[in-house]
Image (tube, rainbow, N blue to C red):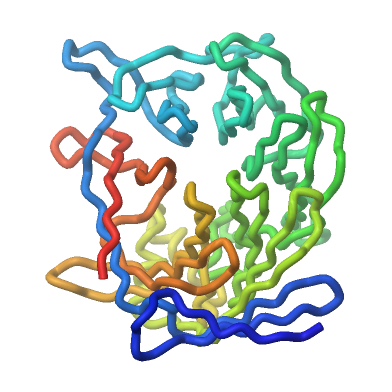
């Protein structure tokens, strides 16, 4: 069955951007136009809360904030990298409790990684060093844990009966003495048993230097990788293989039910991009020269390297487009609604982070102290 929909985001506007939708073999294909349905829509962020390492009395609450999440009540969960644990704050920034502690026993954390919030109030913690997932009850008490065989870096969805995380398998490549990463996304129950798999995806690969007495790996520029994002509201998983602007949408049983696309011409890699890439390495001049010798700079940038799903189920695709405005550098974001319709293209001079309960959260560096802090912003939409 094939049908067309010409959608409009607002009544009375003179020009409408078309969206054509068709179904093939049980999959819905959403073909967007090159322009958003509401091209005048703008977004701004106004800071309204900062969670600093110390409280007003000078007591240290958190040493080095890393990953974080926010629940439906507005409680803020922040991983402390230097004091392996999760620190919980209320919506006013007041310290509530600490979950976990440094160690390797039951309920302990050795290297705190990504976290996930289950609808029933439990907290999941990935421990990258111990290779295990630990679950904590809403009051912070330890519930149980299970080990993994391969490494894992992210939790995409957490439901009452199972959760979804990635699994990276590293295979040696002979005789080059390098490694290839294979990336899978799978659903597990809370005993660690695999329930189903979303399939194999494309992992980020690394460059490798093994010459002149030096042996090290390094990140590659604008690599073709799988970009993934979970949608807690609708229990969906979004995937974009970022050499094309095509986004696959999986349901909570691991099946693709929708594909979203829009016309898009990838940006060329400029001399400034190359300069920025090579200057980003905190390495000696000798090592930088070895990296430059062993890297092949692509002709085009990838489409995206990050996607975010906000609390309303809208998908934000962070593009590698930038522009200057009033002395600021702005980054572009394409925003799609729950139907997969391209509704807005917005620009922001700050990196957009987690969006929950109508607020945006992101880690930042305090200009005065140099401390890492978590900031919360009010979100304002305007035409």
Height in image: 127 above or below 306? Answer: above
Displayed quadrant of residue 103: top right
Residue at (58% x, 46% y) in the render:
233
| Residue 356 image position (x, y, % from top left) | 43, 42
Mark yes or no: residue 268 visible. Answer: no
Q: Decide if residue 289 is on the left or right side of residue 365.
A: right
Height in image: 281 above or below 372? Answer: below
Displayed quadrant of residue 365: top left
Mark yes or no: residue 188 visible. Answer: yes
Residue at (86% x, 39% y) in the render:
195
Q: Decide if residue 186 is on the left or right side of residue 79.
A: right
Residue at (38% x, 78% y) in the render:
11
| Residue 218 image position (x, y, % from top left) | 55, 57
State the quadrant of the N terminus.
bottom right
**Is 186 in front, or is 315?**
315
The residue positioned farthest toward the front in the image shown:
12
Displayed quadrant of residue 58: top left
Tag count in the figure?
0
| Residue 305 image position (x, y, % from top left) | 52, 63
| Residue 161 image position (x, y, % from top left) | 77, 30
């Amino acid at each position: 069955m094939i049908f067309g929909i010409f959608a409009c985001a607002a009544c009375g506007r003179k020009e409408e951007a078309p969206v054509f939708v068709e179904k093939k073999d049980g999959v819905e294909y959403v073909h967007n136009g090159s322009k958003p349905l509401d091209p005048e829509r703008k977004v701004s962020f106004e800071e309204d809360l900062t969670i600093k390492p110390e409280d007003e009395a000078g007591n240290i609450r958190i040493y080095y904030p890393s990953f974080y999440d926010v629940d439906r009540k507005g409680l803020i969960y922040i991983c402390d990298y230097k004091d392996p644990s999760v620190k919980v704050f209320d919506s006013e920034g007041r310290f509530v409790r600490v979950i976990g502690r440094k160690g390797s026993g039951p309920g302990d954390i050795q290297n705190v990684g990504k976290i996930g919030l289950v609808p029933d109030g439990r907290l999941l913690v990935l421990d990258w060093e111990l290779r295990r997932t630990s679950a904590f009850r809403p009051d912070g008490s330890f519930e149980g844990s299970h080990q993994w065989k391969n490494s894992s870096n992210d939790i995409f969805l957490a439901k009452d009966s199972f959760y979804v995380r990635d699994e990276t398998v590293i295979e040696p490549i002979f005789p080059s003495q390098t490694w290839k990463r294979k990336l899978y996304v799978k659903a597990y129950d809370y005993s660690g048993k695999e329930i189903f798999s979303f399939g194999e995806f494309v992992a980020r690969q690394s460059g490798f230097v093994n010459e002149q007495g030096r042996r090290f790996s390094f990140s590659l520029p604008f690599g073709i990788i799988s970009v993934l994002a979970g949608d807690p509201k609708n229990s969906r998983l979004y995937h974009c293989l970022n050499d094309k602007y095509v986004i696959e949408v999986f349901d909570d049983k691991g099946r693709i039910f929708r594909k979203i696309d829009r016309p898009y011409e990838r940006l060329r890699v400029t001399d400034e991009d190359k300069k920025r890439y090579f200057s980003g390495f905190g390495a000696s001049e000798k090592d930088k020269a070895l990296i430059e010798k062993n890297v092949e700079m692509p002709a085009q940038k990838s489409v995206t390297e990050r996607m975010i799903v906000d609390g309303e189920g809208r998908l934000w695709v962070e593009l590698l487009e930038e522009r200057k405005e009033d002395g600021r550098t702005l980054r572009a974001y394409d925003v799609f609604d729950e139907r997969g319709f391209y509704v807005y293209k917005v620009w922001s001079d700050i990196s957009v982070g987690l969006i929950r309960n109508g607020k945006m959260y992101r880690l930042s560096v305090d200009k005065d102290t140099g401390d890492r802090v978590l900031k919360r912003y009010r979100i304002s939409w305007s035409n």
